[in-house]
Image: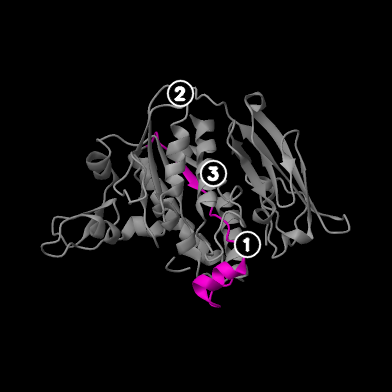
Amino acid sequence: MNRFLSLVFLALTASVSAGDLQLTLPPVVYATPDVPMSIYHDNIVLTEKPEDYRFEFACKLGTNEPRRWTITPTDRDVGDHPLAITVKDASGKVLEQGKTTLRISPRKSASTKSLRLIIIGDSLTNATVYPNEIARLLATPGNPKFTLLGTHKPAGAQPGVAHEGYGGWAWTTFLTKFTPEAPGVTAGPLARKATSPFIFPAADGKTGVFDLNRYFKEHCDNQPPDVVTFLLGINDCFGADPTKPDATINSVLDNADKLLAAFHKAAPKAILAVGLTTPPNARQEGFTANYKDKYPRWGWKRIQHRIVQLMLKRLSNREKDGIHLVPTELNLDPVDGYPNNNGVHPNPVGYAQIGASFYSWMKSKL
């Protein structure tokens, strides 16, 4: 990454006790038969030592383990299930409580239409592991015929997998990044990294014009997508002050609103799925390997937790604008989903968990 979260929003998390742990939950957790789904304790509270607390989950489904609550649903589990969480200290004193809904969608989609999907993101998307996993899951029985749209097909992309994910990019990059082509240089991977795929040269060749309709025409067979996923926020906010990040985060969410509004205008029937910014590696050594002592893990954990809170505040209940939230921050294992030597980039296990979160959300919408 190039650059790099005390309030609990009661209406959003149904929290009944606001405290220092800032228990933060999305309104809905999505799951699908035979696809494992988890809520990792460390990902829902703000603490350096989640092991010092007791997490109790009240739900007729699933199992609470030492570091997570987890479920691999079956077909008979389909439906909505209340899920309540209580956090206690070592003595058993209740510190915070919250509620969400576990929504398990049918294995077979009710939709017989085709699905056209654009995946947008930063280096987590550029790695292409979770787009590959989304494609693998969509290829299982019970799903509609799908097409992954995009101009970027890295070496690791499986057949049919494309996206718009680039290392170091932020919400604003997709809105503004433009570099005029040097004489004799044709469009290609180098030009793509220097210019947003949604920006095209103006008549003078020196300035860029943001034009989603042209993008759809030239790269999507002149048809808008059905679903667009976004997973951004790390590069935007990594350098924020952990003690007062709100100004930075709100500015970033202003840019998110602009990009989302542009997509809603150009593709008013498309569903815009915004992934909640993913949590960090639980190990400080991952941050030491990447950033030495400049960006400690606890600093980014505070910023990331606050990003999720403000995303919930600003982007929830925006379905009329085509905006839906995907709880990608819950199902990423902060220990086994990361290598020892990276602070924010998961290993294949963690990337697959991100893909499963997007897929299970999509199953609820198909």
Q: Which stretch is magenta?
A: 268-296
Question: Is residue 6 placed above or below 217 in the rendered structure?
Answer: below
Q: Is residue 54 left or right of residue 262?
A: right
Residue 28 percent across, percent down from the top left: 62, 39
Tag 3–tag 1 contact (CB < 8 Å): no
Query: Real-space Cα distance between discs 3 and 1?
Result: 22 Å
- Chain-order first, disc 2 or disc 3: 2
Q: Does the magenta stretch include residue 292?
A: yes
Callout 2 amino acid: Ser
Q: In which quarter of the image is the N terminus?
A: bottom left
Query: Real-space Cα distance between discs 2 and 3?
Result: 20 Å
Whether residue 5 can be seen here: no
Badge 2 local density, few (<14 within 10 Å), some, or many (20+)? some
Callout 3 amino acid: Val
- Front: mark 2 or 1: 1
Question: Is residue 315 placed above or below 341 in the rendered structure?
Answer: above
Query: Residue drawn at (49%, 22%), measured in percent from left and top?
Result: 110
- Which secondary structure, mark 2? loop
Q: Which residue bears the numbered disc 1? A: 282
- Which secondary structure, mark 3? strand
Badge 3 local density, few (<14 within 10 Å), some, or many (20+)? many
Picture disc at residue 133: none
Picture disc at residue 326: 3
